[in-house]
Each structure stands twice: as structure tokens, then as C-alpha cells.
Image (spheres, rainbow, N blue to C red):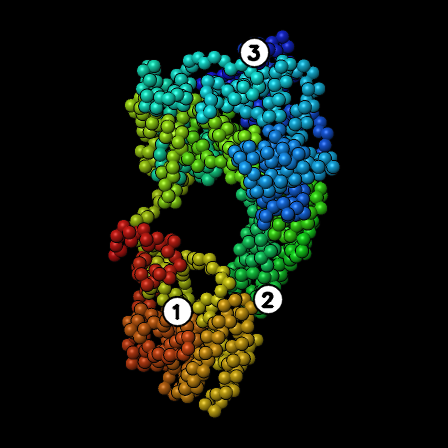
Amino acid sequence: MTAYCLVPFTEDPLAVTAQQVLEHYRDKLPDLSHCQILLPDTQCAPALRAVLLQQAEVLGYPALLGPHIDTLSGWLSRTVPLCKTLLDRPSRELILAEALRHSKSLYADIDPWLMADELLTLFDDMSRAEQTPDDDFESFHSQLQQAYGLRKPNATLQQEAWMLHTLWHAWREQLEADQLTDPAGAHRQQLDDSAACLNEQILWLVGFTALNATETRWLRERLQRGEARLVLHGATNGENYHPHAPLNTLLTQLGLEIPAISAPDHAGDAFIDALFEDSDRHLKERAEHFAKDTRTDPLADCLHTFCADNPEQEAQAVALQVRRWLLDKPDGPIAIITGDRRLARRVRAVLENSQIPLDDAGGWALSTTSAAALLERWLETVEEDFACAPLLDVLKSPYLYPDEREDHLTQVRRLEQDIILHENIACGLDRYRYHLDRRSARLPDWGELSRQALHNLLGRLEQAANPLLALQSEKHPVSDYLEALGLSLAELGAREALQQDDAGQQVLALLDTLHAAGQRSSVALSWREFRDWLGRNLERANFHPPDHGSPVRLLTLEQSRLQRFAAVVFAGCSRDQLPGKPATQAFFNQRVRGELGLSTWSQTLAERLHHFCRALLGADQVLLTRHREQDGEPVAPSPWLELLEVFYRNTFRKSLEEPGLGRLLRHPDVYPATPDTLSLPETSTRPAPPASPALLPAKWSASTHQRIIDCPYRFYAADTLRLKPPEEITEALSKADYGSLVHRIIQAFNSNVDDLPGPWQGTLEKEQREDAMELLKLISLNVFTDGMRENFEARSWYQQWSRVLPEYLNWEISRRTEWPEHEAEVNVREALTGSLEIGGRIDRLDRNVAGVALVDYKTGKPPTEQQVQEGEAVQLPSYALAVDGVIQLGYLKIEKDTVKPATCADAENLENLLPVLRERLLGLDSALHQHAPLPAWGDNKVCQYCEFDGICRRAMWQQQGTDCD
């Protein structure tokens, strides 16, 4: 038997492997326990076992004992013991970063953590390539100078060479002194020691496309002793930028004879050879020559392309095509090959919406899981003084207090709605507690039990945060941070819940790994350094969800090796994804890396091209998709896709474009059906839902009345459906907040307000102005002090109010002369019918012998006199309906430097206005009880500030030009 076997792209390499293995061990069947098969990864291991059993059954063996199937590193770990303690990446990072801290003279002002990351990657590359610096610096410097092609000494290169040479040897010496080893060193030691473990056992290496220098040397020795067999998928008739170049290079490095070039047996392999032919003929010539030699189209009806307008349409197209294939072959298997994780997530969501699970072979970054998000948001909560956004995310996490979930969520809702949103508190445990107590005192009905429950919740949060808060200043060992984090998670009740979750288990395992790394290093980190280090490791770790046994699999190019599928989609065929671009490296350009024997982008590119062509011919049906633009920017197509389309068009005079997919995407029936049997509402019509008498409010406030006048649909959403959009938490004091504080100051000056000085007692004359001013200043300072504690802009608003104070006091003295009796913040209500009451809280109610005047304070723009008298602005008139003897309605506009009183209706106006207003209100109430429609007006002035535009969708129906009767 020869040392290697080449399997064409169009044939099944697993079937060939099974045939060769069964033939070699025919005398020992069904015992394959001495057979060891090594794969680049174990994605195809189940399929290989299935093929072996299938072929063995044909030979009369319904079951097999063995073989062992593993990766090279997995086999070494299982059979060859390590001589030294193996350091994982986090441990090496800590050790090297600590060493770099003490070697500042070797590098400029660069973050030692970033430097450590780059150096570890470089050191691993050098170890795998067996290109380590000699002890002699001059020899290493000369090697680099030659690699860069420099004839004269260069100071910058000399500094770089000195840094790398010094750090490399310091790193190796430290590992040696502590009897430690890195993964590359461990791999080399296990390869060297593996000869004693083989016992004349043959290793079957299947599907490899490249080996590093250490592996090449090891395998060459195994092959010379007849202890290894290679099964390679592809051909060797190509060099440089060619899909067969990797196998040509591999056989050359192993010292094996390259077979003579022969014509492929299958037209698909011939198509790939012609497409990437390494000759002087240009593309059109090669296409014409291939067309003459080929009688039929080898890719007819099995290879198509599709270009979507955007990523969303591409995801829908991929999902639709998968569903079409599953209708033909429910058992698949179907592969979606892509490196675009964003597109992959969207495809997964669309397929799952169609009840089609997806097995993701690659997984995704652990940092993106909800378990890792809990860690990140909790640490943000601690370091940002319990800021409301991360705090609420933590409190709503499913991992928190799982044993008391319902009660816990009830308290979270109260904290969010009543304290954070209603009181506009952005952060701070003490501030949450302060406003909790204030609200409880202000609203006795709120309940002592609720107050105490929220205090208990805040206390538990504080107790959980204390171990971490103690570490935020100065530097501490890594183990201290991780122990504190563990205690904190346990106090939150999250550790047990994480242990019950797949991603949570991996997060806890990573924390244990990092803790072990901290035990091996004495380096002390600041809080920021620890956070960055933890974040990098969460980002670096990969979470692989459990498989569902789905016929649809999500793979990368490399993960698809050795497998054949019923159908394959190459999704996201853009230049950035296929072939991609080289990673940024701090040391050595690609030319120098090649001269030093390190891996280069050109080698990676050739391997990716090999896998692309292999997968292209490894399925019965193939679809390649891309999108034209993303976020308004054009997306360049993959050069391989462009080459394929142009070559095919020149060869067969037709396009690869999938003819029916675009048409199907425009048909609504191809999308997953909703379980709701009701038809969807027409999105292009102006909403006008009928009123429901059961949902109508029995008590109308002035704001309710104003809403139905402004826009009946706004009344429908706010007052019948009781919808309320979430309020925005702001750290800056808004103008509305300023108005609330001013109202509170004026109220305290004119009436009794708990916890504030005032009110002014007795009459108010000009002679008492100074005393009144002192009281107003005292009240203002008390009110704004609370505001300044909560909002950083309150001080500027306080200064603005201080400028207005004299003008307000002048008005107050004059007002009391004309209207000697006054009340502040008066609640009024009047029953108009048995089912309708009108009323609200009036800022100010004044009396004299002639009657009653109502005043509303405005820090913004008040309605005009015309709007009030024409019944468009109904706030003050609504109050007037609930108060007897009203002869005047007015506003006090509080501006930046002055106050301006304005009367909007006098006794004569009100005599005409109020009866009409009452009749209109009664008519509205009657119509609403008879299911009258509540249309959206679409008035620009009202819609500008409406909080229900998301459900009204004014932009959509206005664009259609619809009308409302």
C-alpha cells in the first residue's frame, strides 16, 4: 500500500478512507481497536463511523470494535504524557505582561497587555515553525536584516531585533526555570515522544492540507518507518495561487513523490482545473478551450448564484432555499457555509421561525451569551455607582434569584417604575433609598411592605457588590478579583442558575481557569486592567450550543472538509469574507514572515481557495449568495465568485443566476405562516378604532380632555388602552423638571408643603417685600438643593430662577392686592353625568368679591387667547367646569428673566365658552359610549410631541395619502 492516496474533489473521501481501512485490516475484522484515524477536526467523525459500518456490513460484519477517531492533538494528549506543566493562554498572558512591566526600556509607550498578546502569537508561530532566535543576537539581527532585504544597518530594525531577542530568551528561561511549557512546546515534546507509544501501530491521517514544521518532521519520520498513511482530498497539479497548491506543497515537504499530471476523470474537477489554470492564457481563452473539450455542462442545474439587495434579503433568500431543498430531501444533509456571523445569526432566526433548527458547528463568542452579559452588566453596575441601565439589566436577568423569581420581578418593576422612572433617578444606592423613603412618606397607600421589600433588595445588591467595591482602588492580584466576583455571584443567587445553563457552565469554567492562571502569577492588576483582561478572555472563548440533530448545519469553509452534502449554500460571498483579509500583525510583514519560515497570508489564501473549490464540488446542489450593499454602502463581491460567474458565462453562454429565487421572495405566501388566524391590519390606512365603553375613563382630567381634542387616537391609546411609553432617565435637568421645581416653590410660598419652609403668613404688602424675598430664597434653596443632588444641570436652572424671583414677587404682591384670597394646588372635580366627571389639580385659585380666577404657571409656551376661546386649548376651561363662579382664566408665563401674566378668558368670554364646552363634552361622552371611531388627526403640531407615533404609524399612512372621514 502506498503512503498516500489522493481523492478527487468530486468523490467522497470518507468512503475511500473506509474502503482502505477495511482492506488493510481485513484479516482482523471486526476488530479495529488497533486502528487510529486522525482528522483535522472531528466534525466528520460520526459520518466516518457510519460509512465504516455501512461498508463493513456489506462485507458481512454488522458491528465493529473501534476504530479510534481523534484529532492529532487529541490523540497526543491521550497517549503521550507531558513532561512539564502546560500553561494555557490566560496564564501565559499574565506571566508575559508582568515581565513586560519590568522591561519598559525594551519598547515604547505601548500597552503591555496588547504587547503580550502580539508576542504570544508571534512566539507560538516561531515555535511551530521551529524558527527560534539563536543565542547570538548578531546572528538573529543578521537574519532579520536579510529577510527585510536591507543592505545597510537600520536603527529601527536593530531595536526591534533586540527587543524580540531579549524577550524571547527571557520568556524561555522563565518557563524553563519554573518547569512550565507553552502549547507549541508541549505539542513538539509529545510528537517527539510519540514514537515509543506507537508499537508498530499505523496512523491514518485523513483530510490534512497543511502541517507546521514540527509536524512535518515528525510525519516524515513516521512515513519512512511505514507507520503512517495519508488520505488527501484533492489533487497536486497546481502551485502558488491554485486550489491544488496546498497538497502539492504538503507532499513536497514530506519528501513524497508528486504524481504525474493527468486529466481529471470528472468534468467538475476539470472545470476547477480550467478555472484556475496556471498558464499564460487569459480567462476567455481558457473558457473557450474548456467549452471545446467538454460536451456537456457539468454544473447545469446544480450550481447557481443569487445577488440580494441587502443582508436581510440575503438571509431570507438563504432560508427560503434551505426550505425548498428540505421539501425535496427532508433528511438533507444541508450546509450553510459562511464566515459572516451577523448574517448567520439572521439566517438562524429566520429558519427557527420556520420551525427548522440549525446546528452551528462553529458557535460564537462566549462574550455574546446572556450568561457572560450578566457578568459584564454586573461589573458595570458596580463601577458606575449602580447606574440604572446596567442595574435593571442585571435585575431582570433570568440567572438572578431563581428561587424567588416572581416576587423578585415584582420588586424590580416597583423599583423601575416608581423610583427610577417616576423620580428620575439615574444612579446611586443611597439616592434610590432616599427617594424610596420620600415616596413612601408622601404616598401612605404605597405600603410599608413594599418599601421594606425594596430596601431588602437594595441591601442585597449592596452586600453582593461589597467584595468588588473593595477592590476598585489600587492594584490587586488576579485571584482576589475572581474570588470577589465568585462571592458576588453567589450572593446574587446567580451561581446555581449559571450551573444549570450551557453557556453559564462555560462561563463558570472560564472563571475557574482564570483563577488558576492567577494562582500561577503574582502580577497585580488595577480594576481597569482586570476588566479588560476578563473581557478579552470572554471574547476569545467560544460557546458551542448543543446540537439538535438537524439536517441543516452552519459551518465555516474549514469545518466543511471531508464532508459531502445534498446541498450547500455559500452565504455572504463578499470580498471581506471570501477570501477575507490578513489579520493585522505588529511584527514582520508578509514577505519577512515568508523569509523566516513563518505562516503567511498567501499560504492561508491558497488553503481557503482549496476548501472553497472542494466544497463547491462536494454537493449535489450549490447556491452562492451575496448582497449589493449594507447600510447604504456598496459591498464588493468575492473575487472567486466573480471569476466563477465570468468563466461560466464565457464557457456556456449563460448565467449562473438562480431564476426563481428572487421571484419567490416577492411572493408573501413563501414566508412562514403565523399561528394567528386573524388577518393583519392594513398598514396603509389611517387608524380609527371604535371606542369601547367598558374601557372609557369615568374620571376625566384636563389632560384627558385635551388629548381627545388634540387627537382622538391619542386619547384612545393613553386613556382607554392605558398605554404609557417608558420614560427616559436623564442625568441633566430638563425644562419640564425645572417647571416642576418652580411649581413646588410657588406652592410652598402660598400653602403648607411638608419638609419645606413657608407659607407666607398674612397679607403681603410692598413694605414686607424683603422678608418675603428671604422666605422665597430659602424655599428655593431647599427645593433646588434636592435637584442639585440628583442632576448636574440643576445649578444653572437655580441661577435662572434666582434672576426671575424679584419679578415673580412683584407680580405676587400685585396679584394679592387685586385677589386677596388664594389657594394653591387645588384638587377640583365635578360630575357632569352619572358616568362622567371632569376635574384636576389647579395651580392657583384666587377669589375676590366679584368671583373666582384660575391661574396656571407655565415655564414653556402657554396657549394663545384665541386657542382657549375657540375650544382648542381646554386645560383651564376644564377646571372652570368644575368650579363655581369663575370669571377669569389666565397664565403666568415664567421666562428666563421675567414673568408675564396673561388673561385668556374673562367673564364675558366664559359666559359663552363654558356652556358650549360642556355640551361638546357631553356629546363626546355620548358618542364614545356608542362606539364612535377615534381617528388619528395627523396634525403636525400635535404629532411632533406625541408619544404614540410607534403604534399610529403616521409616516406610513400619510405617505400613502389616505384620508379619514
Q: How far apart are marks 2 and 3 (CA)?
A: 83 Å
Please name whichever residue, 402 or 367, is drawn nearer the observer in this view of the structure: 367
Residue visible at 69% across and 41% down?
516
- Which quadrant, please, contains the C terminus? bottom left
Residue 656 falls left or right of residue 597 = left
- Amino acid type indicated by mark 1: Ala
Residue visible at 37% across and 26% down?
644
**On screen, residue 736 above or below 478:** below
Q: Identify the residue under disc 3.
A: 2
Q: Quadrant of residue 167?
A: top right
Q: Is mark 3 on a helix, strand or loop?
A: loop
Q: Which of marks 2 and 3 is nearer the N terminus?
A: 3
Residue 190 lies, in percent from the top left, at 67, 26
Q: Is mark 2 on a helix, strand or loop?
A: helix
- Which quadrant, please, contains the N terminus? top right
The number of discs equals: 3
Q: Identify the residue under disc 1.
A: 702
Please name whichever residue, 584 or 135, is drawn nearer the observer in this view of the structure: 135
- Amino acid type indicated by mark 2: Tyr
Count residues near mark 2 (Cα–Cα under 10 Å), then give few for <14, some for 14-19, many for 20+.
few
Q: Distance between the residues labelled 1 and 3?
A: 94 Å
Q: Do the residues labelled 1 and 3 touch (CB within 8 Å)?
A: no
Q: Residue 434 carries which label?
A: 2
Please name whichever residue, 432 or 926, is drawn nearer the observer in this view of the structure: 432
Which of the two discs, 1 and 2, sits closer to the camera?
A: 2
Residue 847 lies, in percent from the top left, at 41, 84
Please name whichever residue, 689 or 854, is drawn nearer the observer in this view of the structure: 854
Residue visible at 57% across and 42% down?
155
Q: Is residue 603 visible?
A: yes
Residue visible at 26% across and 52% down?
962
